[in-house]
Image (tube, rainbow, N blue to C red):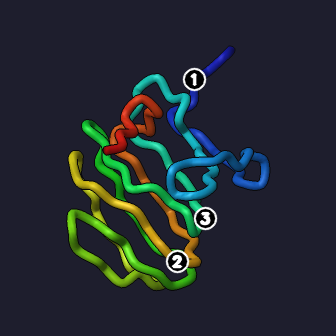
Amino acid sequence: MNEKKNYKVASFADLPSEPCPCGNTQRAFIEEPEQTASFHIVKISKDSRMHYHKKMTEIYYVLGGNGILEIDNDKILLKKGISVMIKPGCRHRAVGKLTLINVPIPAFDEDDEWFD
């Protein structure tokens, strides 16, 4: 019997790291047909790019490091334990030596990354 499981497991030790506007990321659950959400570990680079999304909401949670989030003409100090919800249309970029969790809702879609 081939029973469909109602859960997924991801091992970040096995996920590739790939470039993104923020630096480098590892992305889990982006291939889910429901596209409910995905889960990313992001290492911010010094040359991160200002961008926005038209459909995705992102939730950042800082795992470690210090920096700032430039967001819609504001600056938010980032350090371990800080979380920020970034709604569609909000221009943003993180700056500093940071590692963060990013939860895009719905799941990440590379066609929903926009630059001015």
**Which of marks 2 and 3 precedes in the sequence?**
3
User: Is the residue 61 above or below the residue 22 in the image?
Assistant: below
Residue 66 picture location, percent across and down: 50, 85
Determine which of the numbered discs, if any, sits on residue 43 in the image: 3
The one of 83 and 66 positioned closer to us in this rendering: 66
Q: Depth-wise, is mark 3 or mark 2 nearer the camera?
A: 2
Location of mark 1 (residue): 4
Q: Depth-wise, is mark 2 or mark 1 nearer the camera?
A: 2
Where the C terminus falls, by quadrant? top left
Badge 1 element: loop
Q: Which image quarter: residue 3?
A: top right
The amino acid pointed to by label 2 is Gly
**Which of marks 1 and 2 precedes in the sequence?**
1
Residue 14 picture location, percent across and down: 78, 47
Label 3 environment density (alpha carbons within 10 Å; few <14, some 14–19, many ≥20): many
The one of 45 and 62 positioned closer to us in this rendering: 45
Label 1 environment density (alpha carbons within 10 Å; few <14, some 14–19, many ≥20): few
**Looking at the image, which residue is at 28% across and 77% down?**
75
